[in-house]
Amino acid sequence: MKWLLVTVLALVVFSGLRPLLAKLGIGHLPGDLNFEAFGRKWSLPIASTIVLSLLAAGLARLI
């Protein structure tokens, strides 16, 4: 249950920070999929997720 709560909170935070992260290039890396279907824009930021996970793991190891 804790992991579900953390995952939902992380998605909410990253959704809110998406415009700022887009300015930094996160979401436009090779391996991120952006497409339009059914009249909506969809994105699957696979490479960006891996980069952010590695940064978070490195930061957690330092603390």
Image (cartoon, grey):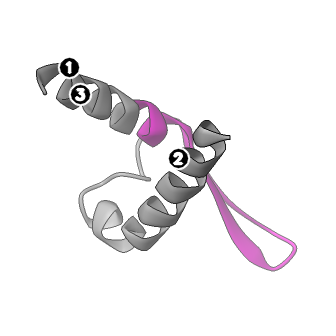
Residue 30 shows up from this direction: no
Point out residue 11 in the picture as x, y percentages from the top left corner: 54, 57
Bounds of the magenta span? 31-50
Whether residue 39 is situated above or below residue 58 in the rendered picture? below
Of the image marks 2 and 1, the number of the one nearer the N terminus: 2
Q: Hey, which quadrant is residue 48 in on the image?
A: top left
Residue at the (44%, 53%) spot, across then down: 27
- Does the magenta run of residues contain 37? yes
Say which amino acid is labelled 1. Arg
Q: Position of residue 53 (x, y in %)?
A: 39, 32
Point out the image quarter for the N terminus: top right
Q: Residues within 10 Å of mark 2 (few under 14, many from 20)?
A: few
Label 2 secondary element: helix
Q: CA distance from mark 1 to mark 3?
A: 4 Å
Pick whichever, 61 or 46, lies toward us. Answer: 61
The CA span between labels 2 and 3 is 15 Å
As drawn, is 7 to the left or to the right of 35? left
Q: Which residue is mark 2?
A: 6
- Amino acid on which the number 2 mark rests in the picture: Val
Amino acid type, mark 3 = Ala
**Residue, far right:** 38
Residue 63 percent across, percent down from the top left: 13, 27
CA–CA distance in space, label 2 to label 1: 19 Å
Question: Residue 37 placed where, x, y %?
Answer: 82, 67
Location of mark 1 (residue): 61
**Is residue 25 located in the magenta-colored stretch of the structure?**
no
